[in-house]
Amino acid sequence: MTAPTPYLTFPGTARDALAFYGDVFGCSVQVHTFSEMSRTDGPDDAVAHGYLTGGPVALFAADAASDERAFRAEGLLFSLLGTAPAATLRQWFSDLSAGGRVVDALQQRPWGAWDGQVVDRHGLTWLIGFEDDPDA
């Protein structure tokens, strides 16, 4: 790893969240259960460690153990500004919106760039944007 990577603890939904992000970003998903890790502080089939591989977004996730709190975010967003072609970023915005909430529609700003914000169905806020849109 060459940069910080988010490691999120979910309230029993890590498997679903990782599958969702894997689908959105075209990544493979690796999951290791509590049972596989010889953990006894949660359900055997809970995710002890999971991650995305082979895609443009790095993310780790696990289910909260009995003595841990689940991830909650206020004042935090994940920025995907200029990280892919405009068409790809538009698709990510649309996919992340499914079951979530658009905070600020993806739109052209007065300075010429495009951006928008969405809270996905797992509670993560994403800022997505790009400089030029050949399809606009």
Image (cartoon, helix red, strand yellow):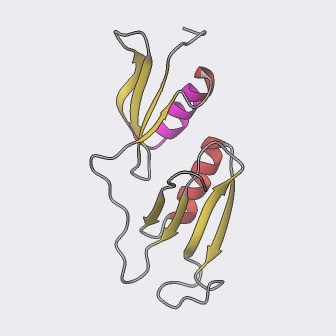
Q: Quadrant of the N terminus?
A: bottom right
Q: Is residue 93 magenta?
A: yes
Magenta span includes 132 = no
**Residue beneath the point at 46% across and 62% down:** 8
**Residue at 64% over, 55% down:** 52
| Rendered location of residue 11, percent (x, y) | 42, 68
80 over 11 or under it: above or below? above
The picture places residue 95, in percent across and down from the top left corner, at 55, 37
Main SS of the magenta part reads helix
Question: Residue pushed farthest front?
Answer: 2
**In the rendered picture of this protein, how many numbered marks are placed on residues?**
0
> What residue appears at the point 27 percent right and 46 percent down from the top-left corner?
75
Rendering coords of residue 55 (x, y %) = 68, 45
| Residue 68 location, quadrant | bottom left
Left or right: where 85 falls relative to 130? right
Q: Quadrant of the C terminus?
A: top right
Task: Give the percent coordinates (x, y) of residue 89.
Answer: 56, 28
Residue positioned most to the left: 74
Task: Please give the range of residues in magenta.
Answer: 89-101
At x 48%, y 84%, the residue is: 42
